[in-house]
Amino acid sequence: MQPPINGFIDIHSHLLPVQDGPKDMNQAIQALKLAEESNITDMILTPHYYSGDKDYDQKFIFNTFESLKAEIQKNGLKIRVYLGNECIVDDKLVEDLQAGKAFTLNNTKYVLCEYPLYQVPCNFQSNIYDLMDKGYRPVIAHAERNAFIDKNYGSIHELAENGCLIQRNVGSYLNKYGPLARKYAKMMLKHKKVSLFATDAHSIKKRSPEIYLRLYKKLKLRISKECMIELFDKNTKIFI
Ligand SMILES: [Fe+2]
């Protein structure tokens, strides 16, 4: 059965052919074609950013993004793409965002914030509040996969209460990252501590974009229509 929502907005993906994304433009187009076939109409491309990365070349990222848009049109795809970054949260992030070195999500106030998966940074909360003080709105990337959640599940509650959006990877619910991520993914959903889902797609093979539709179909049978609309429609439209 066709989903009732008129297409999905995926706010976290690595389908720009740079870094650990697709190897070339052709692979990127194949992955975007699959995303489109899976009912994704809009996708924010979020290459990694961290302030100490000497190899990060913003001009190159931007030029590749423009080339990809031209290829999308040439190949007759309808999917709309936007640019952002998945930013490692450190002491320099605010400064880099203000200087335009790091991208917010589609030029909005929302910043996709990444934490180390296996350790809890000592100042992670103060950095988040610093971002908010400067007018940014943090979106915590794949919170269910982070070490801080295992050490302190309550921190998710605190972050959400204080205005952060909590993004969960589709793959966690589909058991792509092991039992711990699945456990927290389920807990967060049960406790209504998820703002939205994203694919974090890297290619057709690695976290393929079609899993978004798969999750949607699965959850449709389990949670209320109101929740589905919030998670898959309302909370994703604010980025576009
Ligand atoms: Fe990512």
Image (cartoon, grey):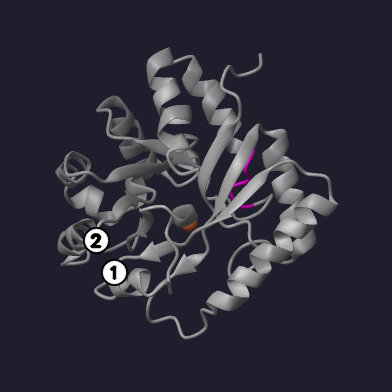
Q: Position of residue 204 (x, y in %)?
A: 69, 49
- 2 in magenta: no
**Does residue 117 show up?**
yes
Are the two marked residues, 2 and 1, in contact with CB atoms closer than 8 angstroms?
Answer: yes
Residue 64: quadrant of the picture: bottom right
Query: Could you tell whether 160 is left or right of 176 in the image?
Result: left
Q: Residue at x 17, y 39 (%)?
A: 161
Q: Which residues are magenta?
A: 206-210
In the picture of the structure, the residue carrying the numbered disc 1 is 94
**Predominant SS of the magenta segment:** loop
Query: Could you tell me which secondary element the residue under label 2 belongs to?
Result: helix
**Label 2: few (<14), some (14–19) or many (≥20) C-alpha neighbours in 10 Å:** many
Please name whichever residue, 239 or 148, is drawn nearer the observer in this view of the structure. 239
- The three-letter code of the residue at mark 1 reads Val
Relative placement, left or right, of 152 versus 203 is: left
What residue did someone put label 2 on? Answer: 131
* Label 2 CB sits under 8 Å from any ligand 1 atom: no
Decide if residue 17 is in sight here. Answer: no
Residue 104: image location, x then y, percent: 42, 59
Above or below for 22 versus 54? above
Image position, residue 133 (x, y; %): 18, 59
- Indicate whether 232 appears above or below 240: above
